[in-house]
Amino acid sequence: MTEQHTGIRVTVDGAVATLTLDRPEIRNAQDPVMWAAMADAIRSFDDTVRVVVVRGAGGTFSAGLNLRLLDPARTGEPGNLVDVVALSDEGARHAIGVFQEPFALLADGPFLTVAVVEGHAIGAGFQLALACDLRLAADSARFCMKEPALGLVPDLAGTKPLVDAVGYARALEICATARTVEADEALRLGLVQQCVPAAEVDDALAALVGALTAHDAVAVRETRELLRAAPGRTAREQRLAERTAQVPLLRRAVQRLG
Ligand code: CAA
């Protein structure tokens, strides 16, 4: 399927892969065809890719789910959700599990991930940004977990990283009210790690990617694994994980210096 049909553009430049949502005419609204293409692209990255950048074309990150997929008149079109809800409960859960795949692959892959958020990140858009390790925001960024306002829950793997980023109470307040979090508040909350004027986004991204790829690839990857897993482990388990990760790295360092 061509990129025009999937709605994403994929480029790999040395150690950096970029996934660009490329449907600016509908504000990069997402659909299952796009999610499948994203999952395929992410699975195709080999271990030379150290950083995956996710961004949206045309000054909007993503307006979330393509709401046309909820239209009963469009049943039978690829990805139509009217067809999904007609399945058994188990079948519908399985379908949503497939939709979640690119979000999980971004979170679980062996690379660092950076969402570049310009303009709106709504619903599935907010969750896509949350699937990434780091969020670099333009001052135009606006986050909204719109699902409860539509009678839905956020179901694209976004609830856990949101709680991890801002804590349970703030996550609940943001989701239950479906309010918009502007860039400056997102920075204060730790939802984004950096916020720059829109005109400076590309320079800031280049600097960030340069810094993230400046050091030993294995050490950075192992450190990421340790940090990601830390909230789910006891202190004792974490110390064991640190020792386990360190032994081969220490051997390698001694060999290099010796
Ligand atoms: N799905 C389909 N089309 C969309 C869309 C969406 N989510 N968001 C915008 N578009 C389309 C509009 O229909 C419009 O199309 P036409 O030109 O054919 O009329 C075009 O994109 C431009 O939209 P606007 O004129 O509204 O653009 P704007 O810049 O003034 O506003 C916006 C941008 C704030 C994102 C606004 O379009 C908007 O609020 N969109 C809907 C957002 C939304 O509710 N998303 C669903 C979130 S819930 C979710 O994602 C579910 C889930 O995961 C379970």
Image: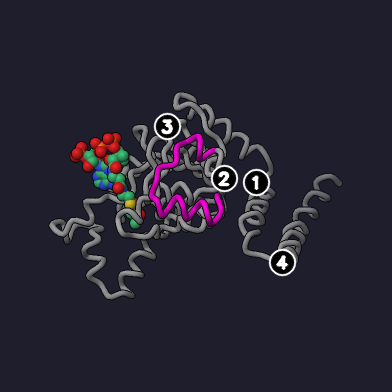
Q: Tag 3: residue type?
A: Ser
2 or 1: tag closer to the N-terminus: 2
* Cα gap from disc 2 to disc 1, whole angstroms: 7 Å
Q: Position of residue 193 (x, y in %)?
A: 57, 39
Q: Looking at the rendering, which quadrant does residue 238 occupy?
A: bottom right
Residue occupied by mark 2: 50
Q: How is the image coloured?
A: one colour
Instruction: Indicate the quadrant of ligand 1 in the picture.
Output: top left
| Disc 3 to disc 4: CB gap under 8 Å | no
- Residue placed at 32% from the left, 42% from the top? 28
Q: Position of residue 123 (x, y in %)?
A: 37, 50
* Cα gap from disc 4 to disc 1, whole angstroms: 24 Å
Residue 4 in sight in this render: no
4 or 2: tag closer to the N-terminus: 2
What secondary structure is marked by label 2?
loop
Residue occupied by mark 1: 217
Residue occupied by mark 4: 237
Q: Is residue 188 left or right of residue 93?
A: right
Q: Is residue 87 shown in magenta?
A: no
Residue occupied by mark 3: 140
Mark 1 or 3: the one toward you: 3
Q: Tag 4: residue type?
A: Glu
Q: Tag 2: residue type?
A: Arg
Mark 4 or 2: the one toward you: 4
| Disc 2 to disc 1: CB gap under 8 Å | yes
* Cα gap from disc 3 to disc 2, whole angstroms: 27 Å
Mark 3 or 2: the one toward you: 3
Residue occupying the far top of the picture: 199
